[in-house]
Image: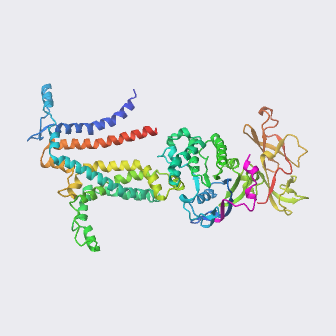
Amino acid sequence: MNYRRLFLIWVPYIWLLALFLIPFGIVLKIALSDIALAIPPYTPKLDLSAGWESITSYFSQLDLENFIFLTEDDLYWRAYLSSLKIAVYSTIATLIVGYPIAYGMAKASPEWRPTLMMLVILPFWTSFLIRVYSWMGILSQEGYLNQFLLWTGVVSEPLVILNTNLAVYIGIVYTYLPFMVLPIYAALGKLDESLLEAAEDLGCSKSSAFWLVTIPLSKSGIIAGSFLVFIPALGEFVIPSLLGGSKTLMIGKVLWEEFFSNRDWPVASAVAVVLLLILVIPIILFQRNEQKQREQDG
Amino acid sequence: MQPSCVDLPAQWDDPNAEPLIRFEAVTKRFSSFTAIDDLTLDIFEQEFFALLGPSGCGKTTLMRMLAGFETPTEGKILLEKNDIAAVPPNKRNVNMMFQSYALFPHLSVYDNIAFGLKRSDMPKSEIGGRVDEMLRLTRLEPLAPRKPHQVSGGQRQRIALARSLAKSPKLLLLDEPLGALDKKLRQDTQFELMDIQEKTGTTFVIVTHDQEEAMTVASRVAVMDQGRIVQIATPDQIYEAPNSVYVADFIGDVNIIQGNADPQTGNVTHIHWAEGQSAIVGTASVPLSQGARCFFAIRPEKVAISVARPDDRANAIQGTVLDIAYLGNISTYHVKLASGEVIKAQTANNRRISRRSFTWEDPVWLSWTDTAGIILTE
């Protein structure tokens, strides 16, 4: 057996095992436990030194109670649905904003492209938290946006944007825009200009050539970008808690409150496990679709 | 070889014939660079017209102007007497086969061919029939459901051809259509192209830098250089009667000897070209003045090489064999003359190589008749 190859294969597996599977196992274990006034705040605890007996009794005490609880209280499924809605809408909004940016970058002259790329990445040089905070300064009723709108006379009363869902959308679109722009830019950069000329030559107007050639050929970038935005947006916590109002219901926020306000680790863990399952399903679907595509093309 | 040349009276020789395409004093400039320089050109219906020249000579720009991707800076391009400068590419009855083929990777072979038809006003019910017809013409029927990256290079070339022919354009533009194919496939495909051109009766304009390809497929060839057309003629005229040293040198192999004209009786002209060498006896197509500078151009295959001096030929020069390029069916001998010039002579190897009567360093005689070469003034 080739040890070198074995080593190369095992490195990523050990990495995944240590940094994903084991923590997930711990979270799942807590989700199946019961809340307790102790440190850590759940029971039963696994005591490996007490022998086989204690291990079996430990497993017998685990149950799905917390998951059943999630279905009983409508707060949770409303939070999941609301998160899904916000994630879907903000992914679409990011796509609508990001696609033209990526398109413009791909069409720009080659000497400009590195600069434009830099400008897209530049916000990452400051802390995410500070950038979200600065949106509070922009969107608040006395903020720069309202000052500007009042000054130009577009509105006579300051708009209420901060602490609404709109502010959450703005925050998500702003934060995750580079994740949408970069994969689409990569896909558009590979697009052969002569394909568009061929489409025009065969009777397409410039706009129909865009819909019939450019969009289908940047599909991979659109899908990748949408996942990169959708997945973190679904569990987003910072943006809804800073920019959203009391009515903004997102699962990330619920999770935070269960964990730190209620100190109900088992329920919080159950919320996290369900969130993970919700995210795993689209990822698996996406990968299976890719696989099928590859096999067809093969 | 070219039935259209023999059967039909050549349209380009008829002053009353209406061209399909007419370039009228067309100039195209890209900022400071002039790609096309005051060019006038007629292309007739059903022609297979080749634009031949080195890269950067403007042939691709010329073609892109026909397709509508570039507009002339000055002058007019007429398609059936209508100025097409303002007509966008998607409204022109002109289709193009791209050098890279530009097949849509996300569409099947069938959908690639149907692409143009779906954008036209052809009723949906007829599209299928037309696509099938194109698939039959290019022998692609079994590949219809495949994607372009699942077929070979030669098949991709045929898909591109079928796609550009599907809309039955008045004019089909082919940009280096065979450039991506290997030599053997290229030769087969050349004949296939000619076949398809004859079957469909479409006017073809082909851009190529490969002179052999242009000679094989085209009914007429335009040799271009630096945005101008140097000569337009049938392939045999281009080869046998080039109008300049540039054309003679660009098409095939040629020996060029520079000298001074000494006209004799009739159009027999002597050319004095080196001290101590007898004058070359040639035939001038245009009268030359005494002592005018001129070039004598002769193809290597028209120069005979022998051990003994032949006495039935007007020209005979002695030299020594410098190099032999053995190509299997023919050999090219590089013969160095006493004056230092090297003349190429080509012979068919109809004897086995071991029976060759001369080899390196051997003294040989080069000879040719008085009509074998041509005299050029520029």
Pick the residue in front: B137 or A282: B137
**Residue shown at 40% from the left, 28% from the top:** A2
Which residue is most to the left? A37
Pick the residue in front: A294 or A264: A294
Q: Position of residue A244 (x, y in %)?
A: 21, 57
Q: Position of residue B34 (x, y in %)?
A: 61, 64
**Residue shown at 81% from the left, 43% from the top:** B320
Decide if residue A127 is in sight here: no
As drawn, is A55 to the left or to the right of B42?
left
As drawn, is A65 to the left or to the right of B197?
left
As drawn, is A245 to the left or to the right of B11?
left
Counting labels gives: 0
Q: Quadrant of the N terminus of chain A?
A: top left
Pick the residue in front: B76 or B228: B76
**Residue shown at 59% from the left, 42% from the top:** B136
Residue A215, compared with residue B361, is above or below; it is: below
